[in-house]
């Protein structure tokens, strides 16, 4: 058993991939808890897709040097998050329609830009589904720094985010700066998405944001516990997913997401108090 | 952190209440909700410590009125003052939402919800202290919910949920509570539990406005009632406000009055659960 577990770790790229996957699993799960509770899954998915033109431009300008992709992605994500935030306040259209238009348009622009490159297919696959085994020491450092920053801010503003999520009217009567807090949350989601880009890619991002958090929601009764369990599931999925990817030769991003989804299914079926089987038993 | 604390309103510094001012004063308030006027030219004063029932049909602007007084919704004309200054200056105004407006599946327990009331006084980057938890437990004591502190909020009955939110308003140290239909959908016993809490609030000098559909309870239990339908149709003693003419102008055909031996009984058929 031990050699089985240790063998992949003899490759430095596997170790870096594991580290990145664990960080991403934890950060996505924490911010994902707010996404799940506030019903922002569509926003998260849209934002992940909408950063594609940004990273594509970064790629066109400076090649695959991942640090510059990171910065281009970060700027695009933050601007898009703030833009969507403004749209949903002032638009004549329904919020999800407005987000949908921006998201699909930006995504198309990204694909168009990437299609001008010679290595179109490979690059697009990496952007869409991640390339965690290609994580360089430099980009791992960026992932750790910005992932850590997101976690710190979530901890620092824990009670404020809790109130604006549970009862926005209370937040107003307590005279909290609700608008600033809302935008801060949007920016944290944007940063999380950029941090996770190389690990799972834009198309699988949503799974990392919502699946561990949703699983933890079924298992817990208070937000701190939900966040802790979600982070654990996210981290474990990263590690187990990479072992799966190594031994049965499947795409790493997909493997991580499949592990998450598997855990969710087991919990949704069997776990007390909200699992399906449990409810059948108590109802019957 | 020091600079953050100097930004006005960020930490909700409570305004010292001016003695002698009415706790709430509305002067010709109009307000829009979803594009149309929900309130027009509403003016009244409340005396500190009184309990007032606000009645009117659905869409009469009861929730809008409360949100304007709480400083959550801007008015489009007129002036609101709470204890002499704008509502945005105060963190002692509690809005107790309708139960249908709350996500009862949210992963918080009863004590978590009540602690939320303390957050305006805690300030950024501060964790609740022991005195804050004491406040939470005392508030739960007042509403008779101490034994439920660790329950998930979805596991409570409607009346218990309502009392938890009143406890949250107490933890907020609210001097003005605006309760949006706290009695709707409750059985008679749960309603009585709420009235026990209201009596306790009266002894503490808390000013309370309650929106309700139940004209009979409003008439029996409150010193003053307010009849609202976009405009203020009457405000005063129940027997002066609930006259047939005024009720018909508020409710149109949706009201019946029966003459009985003891007087007039109001049969209200607009009642609903939202």
Image: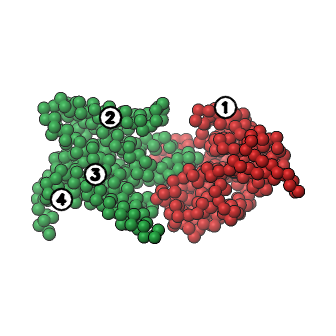
Chain colours: A green, B red
Residue at 49 percent of width and 48 percent of height = A164
Q: Which residue is mark 1?
A: B77
Q: Is label 1 on the same chain as label 2?
A: no
Q: Are marks 1 and 2 in contact (CB under 8 Å)?
A: no
Q: Are marks 2 and 3 in contact (CB under 8 Å)?
A: no
In this picture, is B130 found above or below A25?
Answer: below
Q: Quick check: A195 left or right of B262? A: left
Quarter of the N terminus of chain A within the rendering: bottom left
Q: Are marks 3 and 1 in contact (CB under 8 Å)?
A: no
Mark 2 — on which chain does it sit?
A
Judging by the rendered image, the residue that carries numbered circle 4 is A243
Q: Is residue A246 left or right of residue A29?
A: left
Q: CA distance from mark 2 to mark 3?
A: 25 Å
Query: What residue lies at 29% left-to-right and 54% top-to-bottom?
Result: A25
Eyeballing the image, is B254 above or below A15? above
Mark before the other along the chain sequence, 4 or 2: 2
Q: Which image quadrant is residue B62 in?
A: top right
Residue occupied by mark 3: A24
First-in-chain label (4 vs 3)? 3
Whether callout 4 and callout 2 share a subunit is answered yes
- Report the Cα–Cα distance between label 4 and label 3: 16 Å
Q: Nearer the viewer, residue A27 or A267?
A: A267
- Residue marked by disc 2: A104
Q: Residues within 10 Å of mark 1 (few under 14, many from 20)?
A: some
Mark 3 and mark 1 on one chain:
no
**The residue marked by circle 4 belongs to what chain?**
A
Element under disc 1: strand
User: Residue at point 25% right, 36% down?
Assistant: A55
Mark 4 closeness class: few <14, some 14–19, many ≥20 residues within 10 Å: many
Count of marks overlaid on the render: 4
């Amino acid at each position: 058993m031990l050699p089985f577990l240790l063998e992949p770790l003899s490759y430095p790229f596997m170790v870096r991939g594991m580290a990145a996957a664990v960080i991403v699993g934890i950060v996505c799960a924490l911010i994902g808890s707010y996404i799940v509770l506030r019903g922002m899954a569509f926003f998260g998915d849209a934002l992940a897709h909408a950063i594609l033109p940004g990273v594509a431009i970064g790629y066109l300008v400076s090649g695959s040097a991942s640090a510059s992709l990171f910065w281009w992605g970060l700027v695009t994500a933050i601007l898009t998050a703030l833009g969507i935030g403004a749209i949903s306040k002032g638009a004549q259209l329904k919020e999800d329609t407005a987000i949908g238009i921006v998201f699909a348009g930006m995504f198309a622009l990204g694909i168009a830009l990437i299609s001008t490159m010679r290595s179109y297919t490979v690059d697009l696959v990496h952007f869409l589904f991640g390339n965690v085994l290609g994580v360089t020491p430099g980009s791992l450092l960026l992932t750790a720094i910005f992932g850590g920053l997101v976690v710190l801010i979530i901890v620092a503003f824990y009670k404020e985010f809790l109130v604006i999520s549970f009862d926005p009217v209370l937040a107003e009567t307590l005279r909290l700066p609700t608008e600033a807090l809302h935008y801060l949350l949007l920016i944290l989601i944007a940063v999380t998405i950029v941090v996770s880009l190389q690990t799972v890619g834009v198309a699988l991002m949503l799974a990392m944001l919502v699946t561990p958090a949703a699983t933890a929601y079924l298992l817990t009764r208070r937000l701190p516990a939900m966040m802790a369990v979600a982070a654990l599931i996210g981290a474990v999925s990263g590690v187990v997913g990479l072992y799966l990817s190594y031994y049965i030769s499947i795409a790493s991003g997909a493997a991580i997401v499949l592990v998450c989804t598997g855990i969710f299914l087991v919990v949704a079926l069997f776990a007390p108090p909200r699992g399906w089987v449990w409810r059948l038993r108590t109802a019957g | 952190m020091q600079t953050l604390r100097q930004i006005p309103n960020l930490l909700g510094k409570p305004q010292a209440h001016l003695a002698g001012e009415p706790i709430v004063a509305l002067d010709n308030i109009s307000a829009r909700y979803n594009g149309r006027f929900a309130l027009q030219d509403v003016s009244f004063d409340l005396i500190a410590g009184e309990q007032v029932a606000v009645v009117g049909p659905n869409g009469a602007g009861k929730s809008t009125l409360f949100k304007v007084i709480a400083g959550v919704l801007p008015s489009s004309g007129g002036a609101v003052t709470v204890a002499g200054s704008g509502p945005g200056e105060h963190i002692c105004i509690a809005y107790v939402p309708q139960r249908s407006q709350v996500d009862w599946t949210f992963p918080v327990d009863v004590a978590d919800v009540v602690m939320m009331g303390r957050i305006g006084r805690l300030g950024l980057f501060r964790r609740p202290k022991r005195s804050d938890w004491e406040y939470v437990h005392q508030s739960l004591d007042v509403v008779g919910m101490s034994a439920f502190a660790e329950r998930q909020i979805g596991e409570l009955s409607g009346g218990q949920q309502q009392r938890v939110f009143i406890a949250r308003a107490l933890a907020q140290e609210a001097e003005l509570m605006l309760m949006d239909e706290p009695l709707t959908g409750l059985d008679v016993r749960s309603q009585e539990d709420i009235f026990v809490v209201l009596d306790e609030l009266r002894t503490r000098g808390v000013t309370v406005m309650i929106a309700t559909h139940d004209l009979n309870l409003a008439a029996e239990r409150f010193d003053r009632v307010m009849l609202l339908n976009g405009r203020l149709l009457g405000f005063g003693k129940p027997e002066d406000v609930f006259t047939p003419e005024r009720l018909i102008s508020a409710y149109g055909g949706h009201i019946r009055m029966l003459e009985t031996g003891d007087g007039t009984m109001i049969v209200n058929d607009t009642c609903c659960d939202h």
